[in-house]
Image: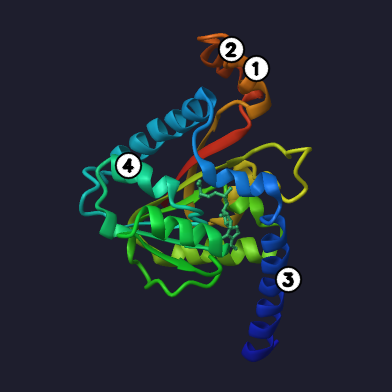
Amino acid sequence: MSNVASRSTENGVLDREETRLLRAYQEPERRAVVKGFETEFDMSVSQAYERRILRGLKRHDLLPLCDKRVVDFGCGCGARLRDLMRMGAAPENLYGVDLVPERIDLCRQLSPNFHVSLGNAAQTAFERGQFDVALNFTMMSSVLDDDVARLIAAEMDRVVKPNGIILWYDLRYQNPWNPNVRPYSTRAIRRLFPDWRVRAKSLTLPPQLSRVLNKCPGSYGLLHLVPLFRISLFAVLSRR
Ligand SMILES: C[S@@+](CC[C@H](N)C(=O)[O-])C[C@H]1O[C@@H](n2cnc3c(N)ncnc32)[C@H](O)[C@@H]1O
């Protein structure tokens, strides 16, 4: 296939996936995601991955964060970037890209010093090797097309410095109530990033279960000890 033909096929796939995703994010329950914490469970989840983020950064000598550049692929309204700000990152070093205009608008409103742009994570204007850390936090699970997922992974690979890392937190099981998402196993992450070492751990209980556990203090931690109940994978990716 010529370069021109492969680019237009690529653009066709991206257009189709963008249309599907924008439609999926019109649904009311998707819109609710921008609201933030509503239960103690939301806080248990975020504390669990924040601990993992800190460990990953420390292990790869990326602390303190104040002079590190971070990009969030599928940044939504910027919640994960604000988490990193609490860990010491400077707002002017925080970047994001997202496909949904309302999310980018809200991110700009909440965090005017971040550099966020509206667009597809598969084709960004970031420079090669610009970032110390790239995040995928529940973005890749929204990508149902394998070609688009590969393009996004290649884009993350391109923009991260040789000694930088990718932090991944996403579903490991299919959500039976949401046909617009899909899970990724450790093997699937490795297939997307063949040149990277992937260290993955299962993390966090399903919201349906956690809402019930909320009423019984201490029970979240207890059930979290059972690997089968943990619905997400947290992974730290570094170059081989
Ligand atoms: C579940 S939200 C997570 C948002 C954020 N990472 C967080 O943890 O709060 C997934 C986000 O990925 C975005 N997204 C999905 N596919 C995308 C793509 N191809 N390009 C850019 N953003 C995308 C969606 O618009 C949505 O805001």
Q: Give percent across and percent down for residue 141.
A: 64, 49
**Which residue is the site of mark 1?**
212
Q: CA distance from mark 4 to mark 2?
A: 34 Å
Q: CA distance from mark 3 to mark 1?
A: 38 Å
Color encoding of the figure: rainbow
Q: CA distance from mark 2 to mark 3?
A: 43 Å
Q: What label sits on residue 16 in the rendered view?
A: 3
Q: What label sits on residue 57 in the rendered view?
A: 4
Along the viewing direction, whichever of 141 and 197 lies nearer the viewer:
141
Up the image or down, 42 lies above or below 95; here it is above
Instruction: Looking at the image, tell me whether mark 4 or mark 2 is earlier in sequence order.
Output: 4
Q: Give percent across and percent down for residue 118.
A: 50, 68
Q: Amino acid at mark 4?
A: Leu
Looking at the image, do the residues carrying marks 2 and 1 touch, with CB atoms under 8 Å apart? yes
Looking at the image, do the residues carrying marks 2 and 3 touch, with CB atoms under 8 Å apart? no
Q: CA distance from mark 2 to mark 1?
A: 6 Å
Identity of the residue drawn at 73% across and 71% down: 16
Identity of the residue drawn at 48% across and 53% down: 77
Along the viewing direction, whichever of 149 and 104 lies nearer the viewer:
104
Mark 1 secondary-structure assignment: helix
Up the image or down, 198 lies above or below 69; here it is above
Q: Amino acid at mark 2?
A: Lys
| Residue 152 in which image quadrant | bottom right
Q: Give percent across and percent down for residue 90.
A: 24, 52
Identity of the residue drawn at 72% across and 61% down: 23
Q: Residues within 10 Å of mark 2 (few under 14, many from 20)?
A: few
